[in-house]
Image: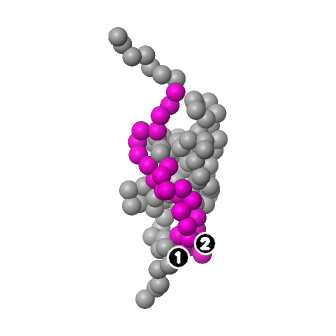
Amino acid sequence: MLRRNSKFMTYPDGWGTSWVTEDRRLVSVRQEVVHFKVQTVGATRFWQAMTEGTKISKAVLVPEASAVDQGDIFVIEGVQYEVVQKQYKDDTLPASWLLSLAETPFEYPEAGEIDG
């Protein structure tokens, strides 16, 4: 029996962790595991961000119930990204958030770490 293409989307490309930040430090984990699906960064989204001085390096879809907010740090495989835009996508099943991610210019330390 052949499997039909499902209209339901999955998030098979990996997972990341969303962090709350304060004063350029990682304060607390907002959600430990957030599954995602990588999306292409559209030309319009890329150039609009560039005119505002932001370089979007990755776009991902996450489930609607995910605890990720604009301004959070989203860590994928040890790389820190800032969530610069969060857009609701209800044309997918299930509904999702499209996150535009920009690599951080420096690594955010955890709040408990003391600078030497």
Left or right: where does residue 97 sit relative to residue 81? right
Residue 26 to residue 73: above or below: below
Give whichever of 41, 81 is nearer the camera: 81
The residue shown at (45%, 70%) is 107
The residue shown at (53%, 43%) is 62
- Marks 2,1: beta carbons within 8 A: yes
Residue that lies at the very extreme toward the top in this rendered image: 1
Give yes or no for residue 11 being in the magenta stretch.
yes
Count the marks: 2
Residue designated by label 2: 22
Looking at the rendered structure, the kind of residue marked 2 is: Glu
- SS for dot 2: strand
Q: How is the image coloured?
A: one colour
Question: Residue 23, image x and y in percent?
Answer: 60, 75
Left or right: where does residue 95 sit relative to residue 55? right
- SS for dot 1: loop
Give yes or no for residue 16 being in the magenta stretch.
yes
Residue 21's quadrant in the figure?
Answer: bottom right
Residue 90's quadrant in the figure?
Answer: top right
Give whichever of 21, 46 is nearer the camera: 21
Question: Residue 91, image x and y in percent?
Answer: 61, 30
Residue designated by label 1: 111
Per the rendered image, the range of residues in magenta is: 8-34
